[in-house]
């Protein structure tokens, strides 16, 4: 996990934080959370940045595993549609 700071000139408005899922206003710089492969995982809001990198890492990893569980649990199951002639 690593944080990257990028200049933000394209996006405006609000963005959901990839750690706490809160919407925050985009500033002139954006902080992106990247994994070990350098793949961007999403943007981090200022309040998460304030909590520190170790906290972000911990939160992100736990929220990712929670999301996986939720995804598996709520994955749409095949609907039995009654066929009427
Ligand atoms: Zn956040």
Image (cartoon, rainbow, N blue to C red):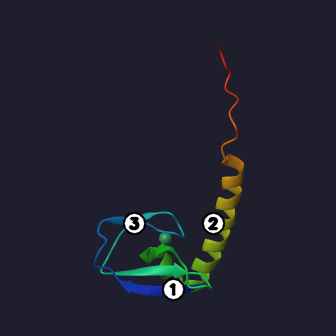
Q: Are marks 2 and 3 in contact (CB under 8 Å)?
A: no
Against 84, is 4 above or below? below
Per the model, the C-alpha gap separating discs 1 and 3 is 17 Å
Please report the residue visible at 35 percent of the width from the left and 65 percent of the height from the top: 14
Query: Residue 27 vs residue 75: left or right?
Result: left
Q: How crowded is mark 1: few (under 14 residues within 10 Å), some or many (20 or more)?
A: some
Q: Does the residue labelled 2 lie within 8 Å of ligand 1?
A: no
Residue 3, numbered circle: 1
Extreme residue toward the top, this view: 85
Residue 1 position, x and y percent, is: 60, 84
Q: Which of marks 2 and 3 is nearer the N terminus?
A: 3
Residue 31 position, x and y percent, is: 44, 81
Residue 15, numbered circle: 3
Residue 50 position, x and y percent, is: 47, 81
Near-viewer residue (16 or 59): 16
Residue under label 2, please give it: 63
Please report the residue visible at 54 percent of the width from the left and 84 percent of the height from the top: 52
Per the model, the C-alpha gap separating discs 2 and 1 is 17 Å
């Amino acid at each position: 996990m690593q944080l990257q700071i990028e200049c933000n000139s394209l996006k405006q408005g609000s963005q959901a934080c990839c750690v706490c899922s809160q919407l925050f206003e985009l500033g002139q710089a954006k902080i992106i959370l990247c994994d070990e492969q350098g793949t961007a995982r999403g943007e981090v809001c200022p309040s998460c940045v304030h909590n520190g990198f170790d906290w972000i890492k911990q939160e992100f990893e736990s929220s990712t595993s929670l999301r996986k569980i939720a995804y598996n649990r709520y994955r749409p199951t095949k609907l039995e549609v009654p066929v009427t002639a």
